[in-house]
Amino acid sequence: MTMKTDITHLYLHVPFCRTICSYCDFCHVVYRRETADRWLQALARQLAGSAIAPQKTVYIGGGTPSCLDHDQLETLLLMVSAYRDRDCEFTVELNPESMDEEKAELLVKYGVNRVSIGYQTNDAAMLKMMNRRHSAEDVNDLCGMLKRHGIDNISLDIMYSLPGQTMDQMQNAVRTALEMNPAHLSLYSLMVEEHTVFGRKGIQPCDEDTEADMYEWIMRTLPEYGYEQYEISNFARDGLYSAHNLAYWHYDDFYGFSCGASGKEGLLRYDNTRDLKAYLNDPFLRNEILLSEEEAMFEHVMMELRLKQGMSLEAFRDRRGREYMDVFGKKTEALITQGLLETDGRNLKATERGYEILNTVLEELMDE
């Protein structure tokens, strides 16, 4: 299998968790040491079979990367660190219950300089319902441990619109997270997928009006604490945006390694098999989708309009070989008239009102 060598963003999926969260639809299995050893061997084969340039960003997600045993985590970090360039943003996702001082030392040893922690909420009953095995205090302790080891670029994931969650509960969860002084916050509304525990039990998130009120409060409140909203769901302090996620939103190409990971190379999208047994036998097994240029143009717009700064019209022309208004002009003019989009001739972005209903705006553009 050949891969482009000018890609500089790499995502690697760790498909193991010690426990399975009730809402999670990502590729995962319950951790078993022997299976994880075999996975590392398959991953080494996949990486060795790919011509990889030095990477500007590396992101190890999951699953739960920190659930690996110490020696397995070191093996993984050693493998992946070989592909970092000198100034690489190297992120690893962590859960508090599977971290300790020795693992923190490993992160530093192999150049990890950013972490994303699954905080979700501070409500003990909701954490139990979600099958999360930590408390807000555990998250706070982990933040302190990481900072003692020199990792200050910490992102917390917060989930809102949880079943039965009130505005007060959501606001308290956010304020508790802010007390931990993270560099970055990612806030996601609960989406219940069919094959999750929530989906099988018929558990639903909050009603749409409550969810919208929660999102509006988040957008209004976090800037008051010094967090700039730079993307629909993401806020950063001191300009510490996620460089890796910006690559997705700028519609850059990226590698996807391990089972359950996806990647993009030009018009080619691929999804590595989600079947761990199949991956262990053939780590190159994947489903490929060749996009049409029209599909790629819309995906480009869909991703960049998620950014608060919007989309560069010049970059669209350079990447797509077409003027944006020649492709989407009629619908765009209508959305500008409705006060949902705006342009200064260089960038196209959603207005404040359009940003709150961006999915509706994108649906209108897709009808072009």
Image (cartoon, grey):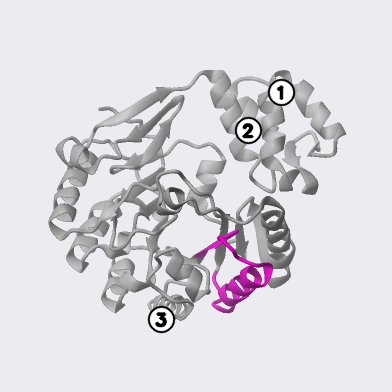
Residue at x 48% of width, y 22% of height:
291
Q: Residue 328 got which mark? A: 1
Report the span colored magenta. Answer: 156-182
Question: Residue 32 at x, y = what percent?
Answer: 18, 58
In depth, the one of 147 and 132 nearer the eye is: 132
Foreground label between 1 and 3 = 1
| Disc nearer the start of the sequence (1/2) | 2
| Disc nearer the start of the sequence (3/2) | 3
Q: Residue 167 got which mark? A: none
Q: Is residue 226 visible?
A: no
Q: Residues within 10 Å of mark 3 (few under 14, many from 20)?
A: few
The answer to whether residue 365 is magenta is no
Q: Is residue 42 visible?
A: yes
Q: What's the residue type where badge 1 is placed?
A: Phe
Question: Residue 113 at x, y = what percent?
Answer: 41, 64
- SS class, disc 2: helix
Image height of 201 relative to 101, above or below: above
Q: What's the residue type where badge 2 is placed?
A: Val
In the image, taking residue 2 as reference, residue 38 lies left or right, namely left
The image quadrant where one finds the C terminus is top right
In the image, taking residue 169 as reference, residue 338 lies left or right, namely right
The answer to whether residue 168 is magenta is yes
Q: Residue 148 got which mark? A: 3
**Badge 2 is on which residue?**
301
